[in-house]
């Protein structure tokens, strides 16, 4: 019997996509020759933990190291060459040119299959002063080392963080944790731009409460030296500047090799993670993938999808027929003791691609029953298609420990299976007083959406109310006195049946309360009494989130 043929597989870049691909390949093919080239000093590390290492929450750098070259060799007989950069690909010969960054030596290696996992680079625009000492990006362990060294050896009292995405928010929190004053400069009118603005309004308020000054709709323009310190935009004096302006896919090697680049600027791949060259695969932050709900191409720099892409590429190289289904952008971010999460496209993302056949519901339930101590409010936004009720997305914000991520994870799984709001109605979820409610918050989201689809609950929204709309506030008088919509008529729910003659019969009555429940009761009452009525989703709580100042 002839011995099995030996494939030689080269993986360029480690971390999430490349390292998971190599390890999976070994589990599928014991005879393959597998080599990982990485231009950095570490082949597999937790870059998501870097802000927390800077802040001292993760004190030891070693805790960020997930796998070493020695581990890859001993467990998998995979050769790892760190500080080795692949500088060119000769596709016709299936060879790569490699440079040893320590010695300067260059050599060639050959492959049967090549996997590109170059990652993404921090955005560093061509602005004055961004190369000054004290200005840092946060992408690698050496970056975190440099930041910690700067903070420990200089009397740093103040920091400016540019950018309000994951890195920017997490760095703002961790610098405050170290005792620094923080100003966060964000070009957009909100932090976490993938989410809808009203869903991050609590985050804007919370940042201020935690001592981080927020400058929205404010672009980073310049950094300049000033009396031994730094000056940002000519007005903010600081000791350190952190750039969290996003990332761009590392495509230089792929472009030079003539591989196809997608419309969003990432490496084009098919559903099996093949590039335009069938012998070359690509995974991770550098690739362009399909957004599963809209079908649109997108870039997504998240570890979970990168790991799954690595597994798919390994399967295909090993002769299996695996495919990558696309992404939903399921993500979570903690900011001090607040958590925000989402899965699926935001409302503004749907509008951007011309999807208009959807409806949305807002609700603000407690994370568990109110009689058990410690119940916290969740802010939820569920978007579903009409008329079929297919779930498109969910966004959630709430206090840490309020099960924000769990709620979004449940919806994420339903989206993956083309679930509908009727599935949410019937979802059987864990319940004990300290963990939830007999009717879970997600069940309520399904109830509201399904009631609308059945015609039992016409919906309206604060951001699309017609001019001169008749507004009925069914909260109690003291609640109404504390704040209400301009021109709203206040008839508390217990009095409504006795005061129907005060309401118009020739106009739509837009009903609201604090969070939506009493307005639902009132809307059902009015409809059955022959009046025209609709529920303004999410009540006064949503109105305040929509009206929250943007700066």
Image (cartoon, helix red, strand yellow):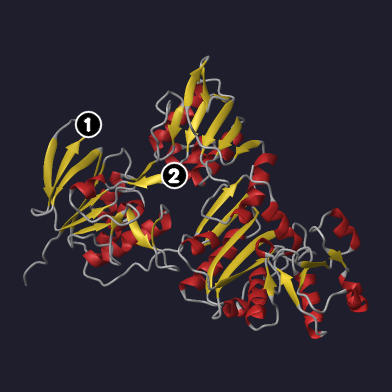
Q: Quadrant of the C terminus?
A: top right
Residue in front for this viewpoint, 210 or 363: 363
- Ranked by sequence position, the earlier of labels 1 and 2 is 1
**What residue is pinned by disc 2?**
246
Tag 1–tag 2 contact (CB < 8 Å): no
Query: Quick check: can you spot residue 13?
Result: yes
Query: Quick check: can you spot residue 376?
Result: no
Placement of 138 over or under 358, stated as above or below: above
* Picture quadrant of residue 311: bottom left
Q: How far from the left and from the top, in percent, is residue 257?
A: 17, 50
Q: Which residue is drawn at 57% across and 56% down?
A: 196
- Asked whether, in this view, residue 544 is left or right of residue 393, the answer is right
**What residue is pinned by disc 1?**
102
* Picture quadrant of residue 276: bottom left
Residue in front for this viewpoint, 277 or 429: 277
Q: Which mark is residue 542?
A: none
Placement of 544 over or under 49, stated as above or below: below
The residue carrying pointer 1 sits among few (fewer than 14), some (14 to 19) or many (20 or more) residues within 10 Å by Cα, namely few
């Amino acid at each position: 019997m002839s011995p099995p043929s030996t494939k030689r597989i080269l993986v360029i870049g480690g971390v999430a996509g490349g390292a998971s691909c190599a390890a999976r390949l070994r589990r599928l093919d014991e005879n393959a020759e597998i080599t990982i080239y990485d231009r950095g000093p570490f082949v597999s590390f937790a870059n998501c933990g870097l802000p927390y290492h800077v802040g001292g929450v993760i004190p030891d750098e070693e805790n960020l190291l997930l796998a070493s070259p020695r581990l890859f060799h001993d467990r998998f007989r995979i050769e790892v060459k760190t500080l080795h950069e692949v500088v060119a690909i000769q596709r016709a010969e299936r060879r790569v040119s490699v440079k040893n960054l320590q010695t300067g030596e260059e050599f060639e290696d050959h492959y049967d299959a090549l996997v590109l996992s170059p990652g993404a680079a921090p955005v560093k625009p061509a602005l004055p002063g961004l190369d000054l000492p004290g200005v840092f990006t946060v992408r690698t362990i050496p970056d975190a080392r440099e930041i910690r060294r700067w903070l420990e050896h200089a009397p740093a009292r103040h920091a400016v963080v540019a950018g309000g995405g994951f890195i920017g928010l997490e760095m703002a929190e961790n610098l405050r944790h170290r005792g620094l004053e923080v100003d966060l400069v964000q070009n957009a009118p909100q932090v976490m731009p993938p989410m809808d603005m009203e869903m991050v309004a609590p985050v804007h308020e919370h940042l201020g409460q935690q001592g981080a000054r927020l400058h929205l709709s404010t672009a980073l323009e310049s950094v300049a030296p000033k009396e031994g310190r730094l000056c940002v935009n000519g007005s903010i004096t600081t000791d350190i500047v952190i750039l969290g302006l996003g990332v761009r896919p590392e495509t230089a090697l792929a472009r030079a090799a003539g591989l196809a680049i997608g419309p969003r600027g990432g490496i084009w791949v098919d559903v099996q993670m093949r590039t335009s060259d069938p012998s070359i695969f690509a995974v991770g932050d550098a690739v362009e993938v399909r957004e599963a709900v809209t079908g649109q191409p997108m870039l997504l720099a998240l570890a979970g999808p990168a790991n799954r892409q690595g597994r798919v590429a390994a399967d295909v190289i090993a002769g299996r027929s695996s495919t990558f289904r696309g992404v939903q952008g399921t993500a979570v971010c903690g900011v001090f003791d607040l958590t925000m999460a989402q899965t699926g496209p935001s409302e503004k993302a749907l509008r951007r691609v011309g999807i208009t056949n959807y409806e949305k519901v807002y609700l603000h339930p407690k994370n568990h029953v109110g009689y058990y101590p410690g119940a916290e409010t969740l802010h939820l936004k569920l978007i579903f298609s009409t008329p079929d009720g297919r779930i498109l997305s969910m966004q959630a914000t709430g206090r840490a420990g309020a099960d924000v991520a769990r709620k979004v994870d449940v919806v994420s799984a339903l989206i993956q299976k083309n679930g509908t709001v009727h599935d949410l109605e019937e979802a059987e979820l864990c319940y004990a007083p300290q963990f939830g409610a007999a009717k879970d918050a997600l069940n309520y989201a399904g109830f509201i959406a399904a009631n609308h689809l059945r015609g039992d609950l016409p919906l309206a929204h604060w951001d699309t109310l017609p001019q001169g709309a008749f507004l009925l506030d069914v909260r109690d008088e003291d609640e109404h006195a504390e704040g209400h919509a301009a021109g709203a008529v206040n008839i508390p729910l217990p009095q409504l049946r006795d005061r129907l003659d005060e309401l118009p019969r020739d106009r739509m009555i837009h009903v609201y309360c604090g969070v939506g429940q009493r307005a639902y009761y009132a809307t059902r009452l009015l409809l059955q009494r022959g009046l025209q009525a609709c529920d303004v989703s999410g009540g006064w709580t949503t109105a305040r989130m929509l009206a929250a100042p943007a700066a």
